[in-house]
Amino acid sequence: MPTIPSAYRAPLLFRNGHIATIYSGLIRKVNGLHQTRERMELPDGDFMDLDWSYASVPTPKVVILLHGLEGNGQRPYITGSARTFNAHSYDACAVNFRGCSGETNRLYRSYHSGATEDLDAVVRHILVSKKYNNIVIKGFSLGGNMTLKYLGEGRKLPKELRAGIAVSAPCSLHSSLIQLLSWNNLAYAIRFKNHLIAKLRAKQQLYPELIPDSDIEKIRTLKDFDDVYTSRAHGFEDALDYYRQCSSLQFLHGIELPSLILNAKNDSFLGPECYPFEVARGHRNLFLETPSNGGHVGFHDKQNVYYNEKRAIKFLEEVL
């Protein structure tokens, strides 16, 4: 599909990408959502926690929500989406990636942008209940990249899986990293790095021989973290190999289900390769929407129902 026009018109203040990003990530509050936690045991002996919220009446439809780097199931972009989907007769399963639910995961490994085996485990877990015949996935940032990779990497997908939505997706992880390491994004990069190091310190208590202090002291940037930990813990040669193998850009051609990418043009986290215009033009299943404003996982809109939340529902009504 060619790039589709966007109806999003940001309120005046939120036309600034940084304001949209910071407000939506740190200030926005979402009320009126009740979540119930389920612990899902993984085949390798680890676990992930799933935060469920439900439509007002029983429904055969469910959305799987995937958070971004150092997010969790209680971030406002997740709870806002869950609330909107619940109001439109979808149950919502907000996934907390390994180590992101407030408790260190058991294994040396953790989560990363390309860990689609964990997403597949969630999908299969949901299918066991035989409750749902209509599953959609909506991922944000890191979770958006994972969504697209999962849909396009060639695995056999269950017939119940119907569509995917990726918001602020870093389709090229290296392109996104270059942006995050720029002066324009220094405050974000420092915040991410500090969160990641704190988690690594906690994991060090479980695996001191694998995470020596000397390695942690080498971490000055996000790339250093991926060199020191992400690549080693997940079987990649180094950070650049991780970015190469896990970027969803190379898998977009393989997507066979209706999929929407919503990436704002003023998203300071995304480099040029994160806007796959050429791929979308020749693709029958991929819909690329690039509004002028929105920031990174922003898209502020009226009555605290964000544009990405409304657009997800409208997209599903259009394609399903």
Image: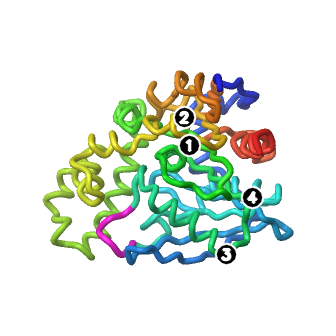
Q: Could you give the CA–CA distance between mark 4 and mark 3, rounded to whole angstroms?
A: 22 Å
Q: Quadrant of the C terminus?
A: top right
Q: Which mark is residue 22?
A: 1
**Magenta residues, as a range?**
105-110
Kindly indicate whether the residue at mark 1 contacts the one at mark 2 (C-beta within 8 angstroms): yes
The amino acid pointed to by label 2 is His
Say which residue appears at 68% left-offset and 51% top-offset.
162
Mark 3 and mark 1 lie on one chain; the one further toward the N terminus is: 1
As drawn, 178 above or below 3? below
* SS class, disc 3: loop
Side of 181 relative to 145 (left or right): left
Residue density around tag 1, few if under 14, some if 14–19, many if 20 or more, within 10 Å: some
Question: At which x and y percent is residue 122?
Answer: 55, 65
Q: Which residue is mark 2?
A: 18
Q: Is residue 199 magenta?
A: no
Side of 148 relative to 180 (left or right): right
Q: Could you give the CA–CA distance between mark 4 and mark 1, rounded to whole angstroms?
A: 21 Å
